Amino acid sequence: MVSDNSEVARGAYSVFSSSTGGLHLALSRSSVNASIQSAFDWDQNACKVYEANHGRGVVERVSISTLTATNLARYEAEMWLLSPSCQPYTVLNPNAKGDLDPKAKSLGEQSSASSKYC
């Protein structure tokens, strides 16, 4: 881990399971000299809110479990920001299944794809 922010990698980042853009906002408020070039989420409403918060052309409606190493390479992101889908874990979802929910698997599948990319 780099402790001096002047040495932190600069450039384009990608966000997986972007939701409404919380990681995007956090990065923009940090001292890291970087920008989000791509974001991915399956939920249509989350994508609409993301666009309202951060502008058009960044977020793409896609299940991250379908992204392959080839898909990821074209973004040429220097860093990826990832978070699990919240729906399997929220108390507001009466059908929440935690780790048994298919949405919970997408982050693990993305990690497998990323290991092929690196």
Image (tube, grey):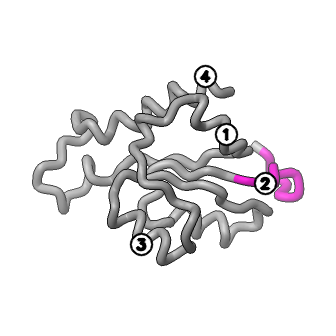
The residue indicated by pointer 2 is 11
Disc 2 + disc 4, Cβ < 8 Å: no
The residue indicated by pointer 3 is 49
Over which residues does the magenta segment extend?
2-12
Residue, x 56% and y 52% (percent of image)? 15
Residue, x 37% and y 51% (percent of image)? 42
**Among the 4 quarters of the image, the one containing residue 74:** top right
The amino acid type of the residue labelled 2 equals Gly
> If the image is split into quadrants, where does the C terminus sit?
top right
Disc 2 + disc 1, Cβ < 8 Å: no
Gap in Å between the C-alphas at discs 2 and 4? 21 Å
Position of residue 3 measured from the top left corner of the image (x, y, whole percent): 80, 51
Q: Does the magenta stretch include residue 8?
A: yes
The amino acid type of the residue labelled 3 equals Val
Does label 1 or label 3 sit earlier along the sequence?
Answer: 3
> If the image is split into quadrants, where does the N terminus sit?
top right
Q: Residue 74 carries which label?
A: 1
Gap in Å between the C-alphas at discs 1 and 4? 14 Å
